[in-house]
Amino acid sequence: MKSAKIIIMSLILILSTGCISIETSFHSHNHNYPIKVFVQIEEEAAAFEFAKFKLTVGNVTIDKLNTPFFVGRVGINDGEVPIIFTVKGSLTNWYGKNLKIRELLSVSFKVNDNDKILITLKIYKEDDTFRVGIDEKKSGVIGREIPEDVFLSPEDALLKRAEGTEFYNELMKELEKNREIREKFWRQYKETGDLKYLRSYRDSFYAVRIFGELAKWRKLNEVEHKILLAELKANNAYYSYYTSPTKDFSALVFSDDSPYYSTFRIKEPFNSSLPFIYYTGRGFNLYPVTAIHWAEIYFQRGQNKKALQILKELSQYTQYGEYNGEKYVLFKNYFHFENASVPWVSGYAQGMGAGVYAIAYNLTGNETYLKIAKGLVNSFDLPLSMNGFVSHTKYGDWYLEYNYNSNELVLNGHIIALQGLYYYWQVTHDEKAWRLFQNGVQAVRNALPIFDTGSWSKYSNIHGDASEFYHRLHIRLLKWLYDVTGDKYFLEYARKWNDYLMIRGLKPEKI
């Protein structure tokens, strides 16, 4: 009660010194309050779990993502604007269920007379509750901390950044096609109220929105323009004929080649050997992890031509940099996943990528493949602040499948990164790759007990039981570690986890 009394007394003090009130937070037309305030809801975190939302700030209802709404004016107190306000409203998920939400938020800005402020809000999940918070990285004084381009539409921001580049005309053509597609879905939704059309509207538009949001804040590089165009073409081709898939992680290809049966195949003028992966609210995205996984499968099956075709096309999406005098390569992901900001990096793609590109070099003698492979190995040196993916844990160095969360240690992703490093070492005998491999193996050895529930394996240290698919994958990966290291500890765990299958009456793995 004491802390609650302190909070209440603090609010009373702030309100009594001329700050805004809680319920009527903003003054729409009173020019005695010189600072204009805009609020937007960003497309991130839990926003993808909802088909619709209506959140009220002051007297203004916000129902669009990444769109600044003018909510009113506030006053200055000694060069500072402390703002306390209520966000309330409703969220509707993709099954039509409505949820109420209410949040009391506060933030403060240092301002000059007649400045404009942007407050960016995010919808996130805390345990089983949905909440609203302030994204401080995207909140601030417009024109000083926040670019004026935040007021542009996604299309206008993209075209502005593409002016004078080789991508402008093609981008304009694909944007027009995308506009026609999503307008069709919007009409169908309005006519029927069927959420599948709203989902398809959101999905078909996602690549434009996500890259458009990036373009509001900075220039896009050449590779980002290429990824945008590839994703636009893929989504335009698919949504010209179909509504969204009902299942996340559905794969889309534009050829007859796929190592899996459950893949959407479309033959369009868009010629690509790469898979595009679907997530609700995000449409189809280029995901290097899946492309590299497919290349590895093809190599294992002896279908080298198909693997090389994927790796050749994927190579145009590598992004180069330099750290501590060495050139590195990153495969970046441009879609939101869980709580990721965009772009993010996966240790799976970096590690296994090094391996499959080394194999490609060994088969072809193409030095470009070796350059990419070596750059991917060098990326293991990057700190997390530079889109690195190595977490220095109490168990040892862990290669993160999702580098936006350094606390989540994913077992399969880490070992698959080790496989790639091992393949690279087999081709090059590079000491650095061997050291990275050995460090990662020791981390697995140290951490294995935390992935054992006593009756099953865990997907990661912070998740519960793995699915049967991942449990079986864990067994095969541990058997592989035993095969290449000779350490019977890995074989013991593989057998132990195989026993868990049999205890549940399931067919065991052949180890």
Image: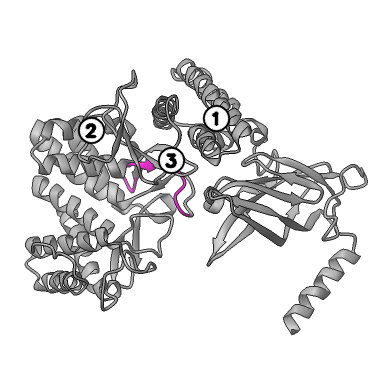
In the rendered structure, which disc, 3 or 1, sits on the residue that comes first in sequence?
A: 1
Q: Would residue 289 be found to the left or right of residue 125 on screen?
A: left
Mark 3 surroundings within 10 Å by alpha-carbon count, few (fewer than 14), some (14 through 19), many (20 or more): many
Q: Where is mark 3, residue-wise?
A: 334
Task: Give the quadrant of the N terminus.
Answer: bottom right
Q: What residue type is labelled 3?
A: Tyr
Q: Would residue 81 be found to the left or right of residue 337 on screen?
A: right
Q: Locate residue 431, reporting x and y percent.
A: 14, 54
Q: Where is mark 2, residue-wise?
A: 310
Contact flag, marks 1 and 2 (Cβ < 8 Å): no
Of all residues, the one furthest to the top in this rendering is: 169
In the rendered structure, which disc, 1 or 2, sits on the residue that comes first in sequence?
A: 1
Q: Where is mark 1, residue-wise?
A: 185
Q: Is residue 85 a member of the stretch shown in magenta?
A: no
How far apart marks 2 and 3 lie (CA) works out to 19 Å
User: Which dot marks residue 196?
Assistant: none
Residue drawn at x 72%, y 56% as measured from the top left? 88
How far apart marks 1 and 2 lie (CA) works out to 32 Å
Residue drawn at x 40%, y 28% as measured from the top left? 238
Q: Is residue 335 a member of the stretch shown in magenta?
A: yes
Of all residues, the one furthest to the front in this rendering is: 192
Q: Give the range drawn in magenta.
A: 323-338
Q: Would residue 147 be found to the left or right of residue 269 on screen?
A: right
